[in-house]
Amino acid sequence: MRRLRYNVAMSLDGFIAGHKGEYDWIVEDRTIDFEALFREFDTLLMGRKTFEILRSQGPGGPSAGMNIVVVSSTLRSADHPDVTIIGQDVVRAVATMKASPGRDIWLFGGGMLFRSLLDARLVDTVEVAVMPVLLGGGIPLLPSGQRVAGLRLVSSKALPSGIVMLAYELPKGSV
């Protein structure tokens, strides 16, 4: 079965984006092999706002050739024929994706989407690149909701830039 992995950059004070969705605070580190990271996935799953940011960057980039799946009740498939849009029954659609053949699925963005899929027990790992930045506010890693305990640290690495890479596996039936 494919894994759903929430892989995200976060400020030291727990935000994945600034108040207006900005991400210019993310520290660059040349020791991170993004090409290798992207090869672990064949699907990017994201919310509408993250999709709009991705689209604003133009074609190409590391997401080229990947399946893009957007959870949105406002986007229309006819306007985005190269994208799969899930407008309803998100939990069932994601469970079906996980059960289908392929590489892992990257939960690419959206704290609210992360929360809903976490509550549905569909997230397998939380992989956070903690940036040496304090934003003081913005979009949190995880909106309020149910407590999840018993995460198992599977890797940690401090990079020369001050970034700390953490990966946690969620226990089955953790929520």
Image: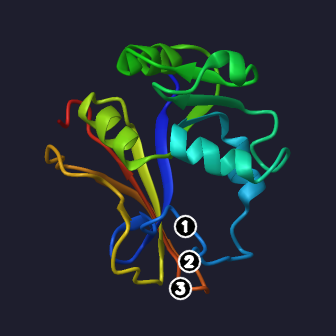
- Of the residues tagged 2 and 3, which is closer to the observer? 2
Separation of disc 2 and disc 1 at Cα?
8 Å
Classify residue 117 as left or right of residue 93: left
Residue at 68%, 51% in the rendered image: 37
Separation of disc 1 and disc 3 at Cα?
20 Å
Q: SS for tag 1? A: loop
Can you give x and y, in whole percent of width and height, for residue 57 in the image? 76, 54
From the image, tell me which residue sits under label 3.
162
Name the N-terminal-most of marks 1 and 3: 1
Q: SS for tag 3? A: loop
Classify residue 132 as left or right of residue 61: left
Classify residue 106 as left or right of residue 151: right
**Which quadrant holds residue 39?**
top right
Q: SS for tag 2? A: loop
Residue at 45%, 15% in the rendered image: 93
Pointer 2 with pointer 1, Cβ within 8 A? yes
Amino acid under disc 2: Trp
Pointer 2 with pointer 3, Cβ within 8 A? no
Residue at 64%, 17% in the rendered image: 77
Pointer 1 with pointer 3, Cβ within 8 A? no
From the image, tell me which residue sits under label 1.
22
Residue at 19%, 37% in the rendered image: 174
Q: Residues within 10 Å of mark 2 (few under 14, many from 20)?
A: some
Name the N-terminal-most of marks 2 and 3: 2
Can you give x and y, in whole percent of width and height, for residue 83 in the image? 68, 25
Can you give x and y, in whole percent of width and height, for residue 14 in the image? 34, 69
Residue 25's tag is 2
In the displayed structure, would residue 19 be above or below residue 86?
A: below
